[in-house]
Amino acid sequence: MFTVINVTKTFLPDLQLYNSYLKRAWDAVWLTNRGELTLELEAKIKEKYSINNLIITNNGTIPIQIALKLLGNQGEIITTPFSYVATTSAIIWENCKPVFVDINPELLTIDETKIEAAITPKTTAILATHVFGNPCHIEAIEKIAKKHNLFVIYDAAHCFGVVYNGNSIFNYGDVSTCSFHATKIFHSGEGGAMFCNDKKIFDKLYYSHNFGHNGPVDFHGLGINAKISELQSAMGLAVFDNLEHIFEERKKVVDFYLKNLNFDKVSTMKIRENTEWNYSYFPVIFQSEDELLNAQKRLNEAEIFPRRYFYPSLNTIDFVNGETMPISESIASRILCLPLYVGLTEEELKLIVNLIH
């Protein structure tokens, strides 16, 4: 008898552990405005991943919005059509224009060889997604950005724990952002973060996430409320204490898929060289959309619910009206992310694999 299996499942830490962190917030009578739990969580993340500057926020989208508000200058933003809708929506929300560049068909990240052709005098930044935790070609993008005096913002929503060339993925770009949503590897229920090495930009990010405040009555400039609560940070601390267990269990699921799927019939994402990946998602790419839909139907009938991440290709959605992106559109029509979370049994994984083919 199988229970419902979704593409992901929230990792819940021990309730007593969570309550022990909550009690500290209760005892301090401090539930928001960067209390001791938020500061402790920031310090732990910075220490574990050798990160210089970090601001934890109340969700994973608002860091992108703040970065675009500060760096986008209502210009054209070169971006990927293969990402979650929040990437493109944030661009439009901040009165900028998304300019799409197609993707690498194996790595699924933005094709860096096509970026320069998309640059115009109106281009102000590159917003690229490390898809499913797989790094973009960071060196090439940095070189292009420097040549054309552009900012680089990375949507690293899936990237908690990813290391590239010996450094945390969050240490690259002018601003890097992450999601701490309940479905992510590391989460705080809802939450996110923004990372920045440049002190001047970081200071602007900081005051921007707190209404623009510079002390109780003074203001640096325009800001918004992106602060996380102590209740969320308590969850983050409790989940953080379980990180190694989470990574180990997710790796077991990925290893099972890699060993048992028939890669003559489906393919999966190629991980970029020099990457320590985090097992964030397991996408399979079918040879046709019909094959995907048939497999999805078989899985759904068994109460197994993978997700079509990312579908549709973002250049095709109504409020964008982007140019044709043949590779992204093709991949988006044929890609399915399989269940991946702590607690999946070998029996359940065998059933998933059998129903795929």
Image: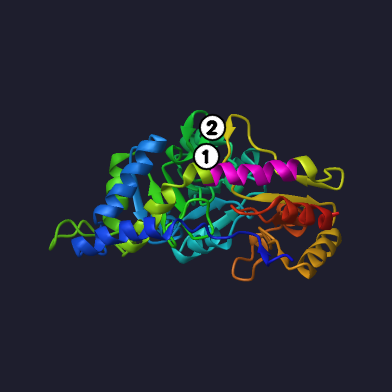
Q: Label 1: which residue?
A: 162
Secondary structure under the numbered disc 2 in the rendered image:
helix
Relative depth, front residue between 133 and 343: 343
Residue 50 image offset from top left, x and y in percent: 38, 34
Indicate the amino acid at tag 1: Val
Is residue 199 positioned above or below 66 on the image?
A: above
Q: Going from the N terminus, do you reach mark 2 or mark 1 first?
A: 2
Please give the range of residues in magenta: 246-258
Image position of 231 (left or right of 86): left
Q: Position of residue 279 (x, y in %)?
A: 60, 44
Instruction: Pick whichever, 200 or 229, lies toward us.
Output: 229
Residue 285: mark: none
Q: Does residue 320 lie above or below 112 as drawn?
A: below
Number of marks in the rendered image = 2
Q: How is the image coloured?
A: rainbow
User: Can you give x and y, in whole percent of width and height, for residue 177 in the image?
Assistant: 45, 50
Residue that appears at 27% across and 50% down:
39
Mark 1 nearby-residue class (10 Å; few <14, some 14–19, many ≥20): many
Q: Residues within 10 Å of mark 2 (few under 14, many from 20)?
A: few
Q: Which secondary structure lies at badge 1? A: loop
**Marks 2 and 1, Cα distance to the nearest angstrom?**
16 Å
Residue at numbered disc 2? 139
